[in-house]
Image: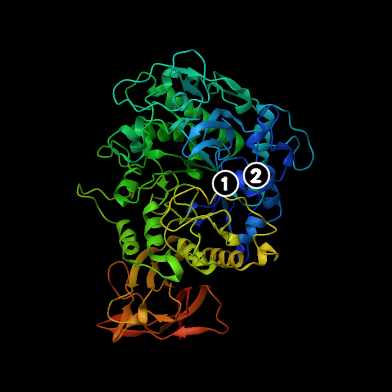
Amino acid sequence: MKRVCLALILGLVATVEARPWSEDVIYFALTDRFADGDPSNNVPKGSDPVLYDASHRDISRYHGGDFRGLEKAIASGYFNQLGITAIWITPPVKNVWRSGFDLGGPKTGYHGYWTQDFLDIDPHLTSATSLDGKPYPDSPDGRLQHYKDLVTLAHSKGLKIIQDVVMNHAGPVFYYDANGNGRFDREQESEWIQPYKRDGFHDNAAWADIPEWNLHRTGPEGPVERLGVKIPTTGILSKLETYSRKGFSNESLGKSDGEEVTCDFFSLRDIWTAPGSAQFDALVDEFVEIYAFYLNTIGVDGLRIDTVKHVHPAFWDAFTERLHKKLGDKAKDKLFFGEVYDDKPGVLGGFTWRSDWERRKDPSIDSVLDFSFCFAAREYLRAEGGNYGSSRRLETVIRSKTEKAANGRPLYNPNPGPDGLNAIRKSITFIENHDGLNRFRVAGISERRNQLAQGLVMTTAGIPCLYYGTELGLLDEKGRIGQDGETGRLTLDFAGAAKGAPIRTGESFQTLARLAKLRATLPVLRDGTTVPLWGDSPDGPEDDGVFAFARVGERPGDFAIVVVNASESERVTGTGQWSMRLVDPAGKSLAPEGFQLRRIVAVGSPDASPFTATLGSTEGLATAKLSVPPQSLVIYVPVKK
């Protein structure tokens, strides 16, 4: 099927195949919580009906979101109007549907991270017929065809699809026979979770078989054919010796001594990825065959890789290298980015290097989710009662992108991947997600402050990623600042979230659409180097709450200045006799003579008439005291006088 260009308001962008990832804006949809487009799949045939919560109040149970909900939104132009160009969906593969003991008690696999079969799609997500009424077989082929049709529809609207994938663990597919009676005593916590064993492993593991929870041996169990394609999988994931079987300790998730690489996640089963093990090459090849199928046959455009730091680094070297080889020329169009839950730039950037980086400088994983930016931006903008914090940590994070470690190696790999872009330009910038971070907007955070945070995501370097619901100003009333949790995994109420007003005319939706439009029409916001220019000083109140930075292109005069004002009063980029100096990455004057700056209000009430600022000069450097309205993000661009 011929893929159609995505028409943005001010012009056409490149097709899905040709458009570089640096031009994309990602929307992260937790599929079960986005939209219930087909209620008939809420309780799949043979499943335990108690696992579905029709009230959508219990975040530990299924809420009904599915492929049909995404398809209806895609077909209606919802994402196009928002300015989205790529949709990241949670893992769609067939999951274990219930765990008796997990973090906080019994839960379901509604989120997709509890794989039972890597080459089937979960029936909670798929429909009996296509969007135009054609029947799908009730089989892996039928479910995979629905997924393929979703991807094809997205491509027809110029949207890429990013599939979330897990290679660190499977779902709770086996139990530990703690009492030795030869059966799964599902009410006993000890049979779901065993204490961590640093030496050796638990030899009492046995495959579970609870059909109403889809709790079975991991698939595929051997070579399979899907959609007419023969996939030479070996069934290695259906063998107990493929798993570490070392159990779990609460401390292991935060460790960096190797325990975090070999432990279970509560009742989830850790896959043994150690290099040099008898199964290493076969396991790598198995995952290459699985995900090459999704990338080639289904047509998925990228992979978001879960729990990267909990897998041996050499595994990622082998996996990405062999997958690129398998994809051939198609590899240049694909993006593989990882989740490394850590706020230290050196740790994050380390995963963009191969473990044998002294010998090979090419990237391992293309890029990572920028948790360091996320934590720093939250420190600045997420405070009780409309207050704000310091932007100093955010400035440090920005500068870290070009800094080197003690061993002389840059923190982030500056060498390009197959697409010609490096890890810095493909870093995924975000401020909220579905994990412990929770939503940015919780009790005490206003809709405007949430828009400011998203504006920062959309104007800094990297590929911006918006979390589902932020375009509605979705509020997690149970969430609290400083408290981690999963309470933000809310189901969208498209009727009530916008308080009766059409969603697409709501303030948050329009603000994000405006930011996406600016990003699409000002290339320097996508590709420019980021230079911090001003943070509030202790010398006076004029600049309190202000953070300013420049995005600088390669040509003289090609720049934009972004200024965030988190305070409730108008502020300027200066204090007393001091004005903000406008400098490029080399410290030279940014603005040429004969220019002034025009202000664009990106977050806040748009200027009723053009607002310009005249530049000053200090010691040969351009300076400016730029005005910023309360609770606003503005962009200043150079124009000739």
Residue type at mark 1 is: Leu
Determine if residue 47 is in view: yes
Q: Label 1 near label 2: C-beta < 8 Å? A: yes
Determine if residue 553 is in view: no
Q: Residue at x 74, y 38 (%)?
A: 40
Graded by Cα atoms within 10 Å as few (under 14), some (14 to 19) or many (20 or more), the crowding at tag 1 reads many
| Residue 199 percent across, percent down from the top left | 29, 22
First in sequence: mark 2 vs mark 1: 1
Q: Read off the residue under disc 2.
A: 65
Q: Read off the residue under disc 1.
A: 30
**Observer-nearest residue: 373 or 54?**
54
Residue type at mark 2 is: Gly
Would you place residue 17 above or below residue 619 in this image?
Answer: above
| Residue 94 percent across, percent down from the top left | 59, 31
| Left or right placement of residue 217 versus residue 54 in this view | left
Would you place residue 291 above or below residue 345 in this image?
Answer: above
**Observer-nearest residue: 291 or 543?**
543
How many numbered marks have been drawn onto this rendered protein structure?
2
